[in-house]
Image: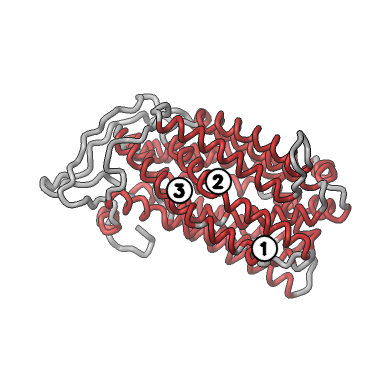
Amino acid sequence: MTPEDPRTPEAAAAAAGYAVADEGAEVPAPSWSPPHAAPGVFALAWPAVVANLLYSTVGFVGTKIVGVLGAPAVAAVTTGNRIFFILQAVLMAVTAGTTALVARAWGAGDRDEAERVTTASVLLCVALAGSLTLPGMLFSTELAHIFRLDEEAIKHAASFIWWLSVFNAPFAASFVIGTALRAAGDTLTPLWIGGVTNVVNIVLAYGLVLGRFGMPRLGVPGAAIANGLAFTFGALLFAWLWLRGRLLLGRGPAGALARSRLRRMLQIGYPAALEQVVWQGGFIGFLWIVSLYGTAPYAAYGIGVTILSFSFVVGFGFSIAAGTLVGQHLGAEDPAGAARSGWRALGLSIAAMVVLGALIIVFARSIAQFMIADPEVVELTVFFIYVLGAMQPLMAIEFALGGALRGAGDTRFPLLAVLSGLVGVRVTLAALFAWLGLSVHWVFAALIGDYIVKASMLTARFASGRWQTLRFGEPRSRGTGSGPAPLARGSRHA
């Protein structure tokens, strides 16, 4: 239900397809009951935080390795990764529904439904990612030309995009299985698989970029190949464990691709997909404006984001915890517990990100000089870190409360927040500053307004409690007129 929709929550949900079954569908009784003591925010967050810190370490090391090749190489990898992240817009259409529906089914004690949602998500994500492989390969040069980089950087970026596109499907499989496991409360399995994957990535990147360990020296394309092979290895590990029933969620009973289930998943997911489209489009617009100032500012942005990602991923861990617990508490008919979980995740996220952001700001110059030897890039990187580092409390709000709202299935409001903040404020101000002929420092500072707007909107939305009224119940039996399957009462302690 949107703020403009005057219908009751139940009517809006029914109209959206959340409680519509295939004709003749039966309502299964819950096949399993969750433990009475729900895990706390920190218990769910720390494995996700560690997993993402490892991933950030890989990004940091990878940027350092590529940085040996110079600023054009760093700019190329920044461009290639940005284009590749557009894939997440497609995957988010499925995985946002995966998180909300798996968490609710798990909280309600319906293991079979959680497994059906997982199976449907894997099949859809792999198919969608596979459909993007050929376009990414065929149009890699055109995509690289979006940014006004020098010819050397464009050439490297095109090859980076080409090779990453080859590995779209393994990335999708790994991404969606990890998402489903976290929604059910298992953050340890994605942690250890991610750890193994990251070790493989670092070894391959060092070898393939610089020609070590007897591997060919491939330069920038070597970074993409290393990334893709590491994702493939992780996906194979996930798939082997999943198909053999060794994970918390198995393949599930038959009927995973029922129309009613797919409708609910996509109804929840399409605003999240649009959010990612807007998000990535906004960042592309912002980076295009930065690229007007030359390769050095562009490379500084990429390095600065890589350094600060050690703080971002902590917030992302609490985002996962908030989404999981909010969804599980709502599935157990405990909206008060869902609210407490969201606020607790916010408090912990702010505390952690402020500490890490402050440390990065203090050592900004030393870290930037370690990453690259170009004095101009170092100076711009330090300034960028100062600006974005000061925004860590507001970014923590975006992570924690945005994750909580998505876990509740309220995916439309985060989309509105991104439209207002990133597009309406950041890109607009950056374009204005560039048009006025102001320095790139002003363009970097435009992100301050972006985070103020998004943090304010998300805080107001979560505090309103309107997300608690959304309904994503199990299909009703047409013959009996019964309501959703009974919900198991869970713990009220986050």
Mark 3–mark 2 distance (CA, rounded to whole Å): 26 Å
The answer to whether residue 51 is visible is: yes
Looking at the image, tell me whether mark 3 or mark 2 is earlier in sequence order: 3
Position of residue 153 in the picture relative to residue 14 (left or right): right
Q: Identify the residue at image location x=14%, y=49%.
A: 478
Residue bearing the label numbered 2: 399
In percent of width and height, residue 350 lies at 60, 40
Helix, strand or loop at mark 2: helix
Query: Tags 3 and 2 in contact by the CB under 8 Å rule?
Result: no
Numbered tag placed on residue 126 in the rendering: 3
The answer to whether residue 463 is visible is: no
In percent of width and height, residue 234 lies at 55, 36
- The one nearer the camera, 113 or 121, is 121
Dividing the picture into quadrants, the one containing residue 139 is bottom right
Name the amino acid, label 2: Phe
Mark 3–mark 1 distance (CA, rounded to whole Å): 24 Å
Name the amino acid, label 3: Val
Helix, strand or loop at mark 1: helix
Q: Is residue 146 above or below residue 58?
A: below
Helix, strand or loop at mark 3: helix
Looking at the image, tell me whether mark 1 or mark 2 is earlier in sequence order: 1
Numbered tag placed on residue 144 in the rendering: 1
